[in-house]
Image (cartoon, helix red, strand yellow):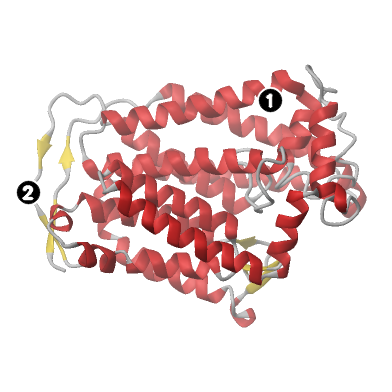
Amino acid sequence: MSSKIYQVKGSEQRIDYLLLILIIIMVLLGLFTVFSASAYVSGIIYKKSTYFFQKQLIYAILGFIVMYIGIRIDFYQLRTSLKAMMYGITIMMIATYIPALGGTVVNGANGWLRIPGINFGFQPSELAKIILIIFSANLLANPAYQRLGFLQKLFTMAPIGGVVGIVVFQPDIGNTSIISLAVFSVYFAAGMNIPRILIVIGAMGTAITALIFSNPYQMARVTGFMNPWKDPQGKGFQLIQSLMAIGSGGISGKGLGQSVQKLFYLPESHTDFIFSVFCEESGLIGSALFMFLLFLIAQRGFSIAVRSKDVFIKLTVTGVTTMILGQALMNIGVATGVLPTTGLTLPFISYGGTSMIVTLFCMGLLLNASKYTNSSDWQVLEGKEDNN
């Protein structure tokens, strides 16, 4: 489809420094929490209490570097590079199924690639989140898209469906849900017909449900969530230990480093269930403060989206903010027993290189967009040909 891309440009302003301060606070909070949650375990397994902390510190430094890139990058360059990004992420997603190319099974899912020669693995699905958000925003910001019929619009969404389909069959229900939520938020912000969105959501929900029932590992997560006390030493063990950690934190918590559940009682205490350890050590006061910071970041993100005069930037920021907030709430929902285990990390806080780096790049895009929200001399640039 040959059409034109339009982008509005204005004079560059200062970034949102409140958002930057919030990001730094959250990353520092995450580093302290990772050290506390992992020190005992890493000391026993790796004979070095700072093993996970040191790696997370490196991930954070790399994350701030890519965040700076996100701040400096030209949004138009993101649009013109989309074809290469879509091809690249599709190849990486397929490679997760091929051991010879580094594909690795973790917790029953073909979701990881290992880089030969170094002890580092990453999840292509984390990259897929932001790429599909940018792809959707670019599609909907194109005036030619609005003139297409319903079936033609569905056809243009085929690349999104293809990548999501690979994630579904890894199987990775958590990232499938987050990608779907973020992409639908972009379509909603663009004014897509709500009944049609609901039809697509219903179809996807049915497909995901069928996949859960057909996969023993995913089914075990659901049954453990529905009644953890039926099998307290098996399927329900993780959730029970998580609830015990949260409940024992009380109002003010046990203090930094004083968690009991992290002493090999709570599996994944420094990754998927790190919020439970955080609640145990900081209590209701600490968890409420964390939620306040999280929603303040979301408020800054949505505020940037509302004030952006460029449609592509507006939609990208909406999708990114929804993704970060949605993933955080889903992780917290799992830790508190509201949702079945999904395997999603807690943004800024959980141990994990791919999650930290992608999250901070997304924050860089938000800070980048914030530079143009208060510009008073916007101009519409000439349309540029798009042959994607």
Q: Residues within 10 Å of mark 1 (few under 14, many from 20)?
A: many
Image quadrant assignment for residue 277: top right
Mark 2 or 1, nearer chain start: 1
Residue in the image at 31% along x and 61% along y: 82
Do we see residue 71 in this rendering?
no
Q: Is residue 229 left or right of residue 17?
A: right
Query: In which quadrant of the rendered image does the C terminus lie?
Result: bottom left
Q: Is residue 246 left or right of residue 129?
A: right
In the image, what residue type sits under mark 1?
Answer: Ser
Q: Nearer the viewer, residue 252 or 243?
A: 243
Which percent across, then down, holds residue 356?
A: 58, 46
| Vertical order, 174 against 16 (above or below) | below
Residue that carries the numbered disc 2 in the rendered image: 382
Which percent across, then down, holds residue 228?
A: 81, 48
Image quadrant assignment for residue 378: top left
Residue in the image at 65% along x and 72% along y: 214
| Vertical order, 132 against 316 (above or below) | below
Query: How far apart are the two marked residues, 2 and 1, measured between alpha carbons?
Result: 49 Å
Q: Residues within 10 Å of mark 2 (few under 14, many from 20)?
A: few
In the image, what residue type sits under mark 2?
Answer: Glu
Query: In which quadrant of the rendered image does the N terminus lie?
Result: bottom left
Q: Which mark is residue 287?
A: 1
Which percent across, then down, holds residue 258?
A: 87, 28
